[in-house]
Amino acid sequence: MTANAPRDPVEALIASKWSQVTGVPLDSIHDDFFDAGNSSLEALKLMELLREEFGPDLSIDAIFNQPTVAGLAELVRAGGSHRRYAFTLQKGDGIPLILGPGLGGGPAYVSKLAVPELGRPVVSVLTRGIHGEQRPFDTSAETSRHLLSSLSEAGIRGPVHFMGHCMGGLSVLEATRYAAEYDIEVRSVVLINTSPRTPDLTRHEMTKIRLQEIRGFVGLEEDPRVNAVPEGEPLDDTISMVFDDVKDSDALSESSIEPFKVRLDVYVSSWLASSSFTHQRSEVPLHIMYDPDDLDWLYGGAFDIEGWEKLDYPNMTVDARPGMLYANIGLPENRAAVAAYLDAQDAGTGGGHHG
């Protein structure tokens, strides 16, 4: 056994799960998970696996404090780690970029922007409930204040840039209304593929929609039995049925029913919270980045950029970028576009025109 090899069963188990998620053998128990090029999505998947082995006392965001096998093993032996919601994905100088939680409760694909080329710190915030510790929030205002209080607890004050994506972006936008109460100055908000509106759906309807989406993620067709459950009837059996259908897929991070239910509840609750958002005039520079070829599955047709242009955001700019979806956000040209916008806002040269 070398100094870099697992030294006990705890490290051996973590190393095994590490390789399972990354798809490559571990070189050293001192390797940094993120320095190896892994994203926060992969980090959360790894932590779900470890929490199933070691229990919920191991915080889901522990890897952001201890990104090595040796560090995680130390936390396990000590009985877990302190739970928090804000964590640094990328260190650096300059005005931080804050990634607000998406519908899944975390930064999802926008974490691919946490690269040195961005030239600034990148901090991500998880929503309440993602640990399974409490119920998720019911309103956009609660989600917004959670974002700000999490930053405050992490010692983040002064100027920041906010970024939101999908419908989670609306809560990020609402956070600008309360930021001054937390000594935070929002220099700009960047929203990626965020629709200006959400349909009025019940929890029952949104849960069924999400279950069908999950089936699609793993390559399965819609199940008519999901849609057949009438409003008001419990969905517990339906959720278990769908989990049984998808649990063996590599596309799913949860391998047992309880974390699957937690993540489903976070998604549905985050969606319903975003539907409580109402637009108000704001002078904060707002930058909408979207894929013009992306079809809005909720309303049909193209992305509703016209809806944004009808609202009262005098310092709004627009950047239509074909291919600006999901994993593609990490492409060099997309990272460069985000960096250029943030740099212009830092320098006070950002405009209030449409482009």
Image: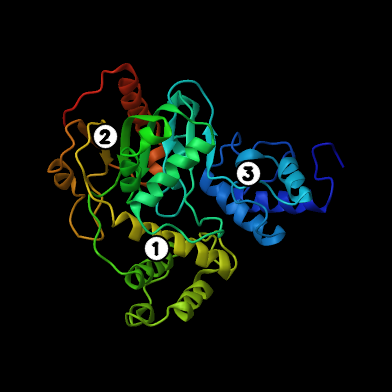
What's the residue type where badge 1 is placed? Val
Q: Which residue is mark 2?
A: 287
Name the residue rendered at 46%, 52% in the picture.
105
Residue placed most toward the observer, 164 or 118 = 164
53 left or right of 177? right
Against 312, is 339 above or below?
above
Number of on-image labels: 3
Q: Is residue 19 visible?
A: yes
Against 114, is 58 above or below?
below
Q: Measuring from the top left, give residue 345's x and y in whole percent.
A: 31, 23
* Residue lying furthest front: 181
Q: Is residue 321 visible?
A: no
Q: Please tell me whether mark 2 sits on a helix, a strand or a loop.
A: strand
Name the residue rendered at 47%, 32% in the picture.
122
Q: Which residue is mark 1?
A: 268
Label whose residue precedes the other's in the sequence (2 or 1): 1
Measured Cα–Cα span from mark 1 to mark 3: 26 Å
Label disc, if present, on residue 63 of the rendered structure? 3
52 left or right of 111? right
What's the residue type where badge 2 is placed? His
Instruction: Quarter of the image for the N terminus: give it.
Output: top right
Measured Cα–Cα span from mark 3 to mark 2: 31 Å
Which of the two marks, 1 or 3, is nearer to us in this view? 1
What's the residue type where badge 3 is placed? Ile
Q: Measuring from the top left, give residue 221's x and y in whole percent.
A: 38, 72
Residue placed most toward the observer, 342 or 125 = 125
